[in-house]
Image (spheres, rainbow, N blue to C red):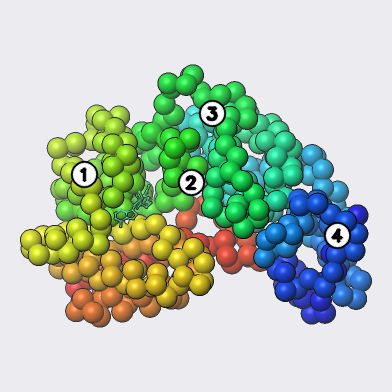
Amino acid sequence: MPRLILQPGKERSLLRRHPWVFAGSVDRLDGRARPGDTVDVVAADGRPLARAAWSPSSQIRARVWSFDPDEIIDDAFFKRRVAAALARRLALPEFAASVAEGAARGMRVIHGESDGLPGVVADCYGDTVVVQLTAAGPERWRRAIVGALAAATGCAHLYERSDADVRKLEGLLPEVGWRLGGPAGGEAAELIISENGVRMHVDVVGGHKTGFYLDQRDNRLLLGQLAAGRRVLNCFCYTGGFSLQALAGDAASVLSIDSSGPALVTAAANLALNPQLPAGRAEWREADVFSELRALRSAGAQFDLIVLDPPKFAPSASHAQRAARAYKDINLLGFRLLAPGGLLMSYSCSGGIDHQLFQKIVADAAVDAGRDARIVRRLAASADHPVALGFPEGEYLKGLLCQVD
Ligand code: SAH
């Protein structure tokens, strides 16, 4: 087995169970390894630390598969890890077999590093699994990972959606396609899941991420619980997940904004899929949120509940400053549009902006908007997106529910 020797002191983060070895921590590689091969990670004093996947093109030179330096990385290893990840979720009440969503449930089954599988994400939509591989290690073990997912979930259809930009940093080209079964019900068939009692289309081939933002499931449920009688504004609505929960929660009106025409077409189709909802209270608007909020303000519009769920403005810490400006702008505009006593539900999914910075940005926005506000809830991703204690980077989604005077 090739040995990756660290520089003195650089074993510390691994001893704290952080699974990345950065280029700057590496002293040398003893032996030969191709991208994705398994290497033994060894401290400068010779102490064995972990087994990891070698990734020579990336700044993250190795990602740890196992902190047991003797664990064998083979097909059986992936079977164990995938089965354990699924078992962890099924042990939580919201994913117990009896929940209302039944067979049409959407659930993340593998959340990368936090499930001990760096560079692997897998989402289950009913009988279909969508897997995304983003690093050299998973690329090498594709067949084992696909097999393990099929065995653990029992899903008959598996689509690979390895087209995320981060693959470029690993020197990997996009890889997409059906790996198992083809689309459920044939090419023309549409995949539909049920979330908190609302039916939603999921486009695993052309949609964002693996097709749907499962991380906001609990927050969409909360929005529904807050919506009764309120005028709701849902910014960056994508396919209408928050909007439909607001309607299900008996909102007085729901105005939804997104710049993507296709996303809004799906949003309207999602509303049509749920005839129990009061469709007459929904309005979809294709627009840039920044300019539309200004226009609404000029027109004297007011809302009682505003959702701001923008895309990742800061993919990494180097973009944080420009992103902070953008977050502040939309939050400022949001605060200005709130009626007295109104609620702002505001998110950042940028890895480069942590909780503390996000709270400061929202606080600055409130000051500039001349509004007094308090945090009534701190929000995060749903429980199928766990954060390993040794990997704080896993906490990418953070949100605040603020109430204004
Ligand atoms: N809240 C959604 C997910 C939002 S994803 C859900 O629960 O499913 C972010 C969305 O922002 C995408 O649909 C994208 O099309 C949209 N978007 C990005 N920039 C935008 C802009 N400047 N104005 C309006 N929409 C934008």
The numbered mark at residue 10 is none
User: Nearer the N terminus, badge 3 or badge 4?
Assistant: 4
User: For the residue with label 4, is its CB less than 8 Å from the closest atom of ligand 1?
Assistant: no
Seen from the viewer's position, the closer of residues 96 and 20 is: 20
Callout 1: few (<14), some (14-19), or many (20+) C-alpha neighbours within 10 Å? some
- Numbered disc 3: secondary structure: loop
x, y percent for residue 398: 44, 63
User: Nearer the N terminus, badge 4 or badge 2?
Assistant: 4
Q: Is residue 155 visible?
A: no
Callout 4: few (<14), some (14-19), or many (20+) C-alpha neighbours within 10 Å? many
How many angstroms separate mark 2 from mark 1 (CA)?
Answer: 22 Å
Q: Which residue is mark 2?
A: 209
Give the image quarter of residue 400: bottom left
Residue at figure coordinates x 65%, y 43% from the top left: 87
Q: Which residue is mark 4?
A: 40
- Numbered disc 4: secondary structure: strand
x, y percent for residue 155: 59, 29
**In the rendered structure, which amino acid carries the disc numbered 2?**
Lys
How many angstroms separate mark 1 from mark 4 (CA)?
Answer: 54 Å
In the image: residue 209, left or right of residue 390: left
**In the rendered structure, which amino acid carries the disc numbered 4?**
Asp
Q: Which residue is mark 3?
A: 127
**In the rendered structure, which amino acid carries the disc numbered 1?**
Trp
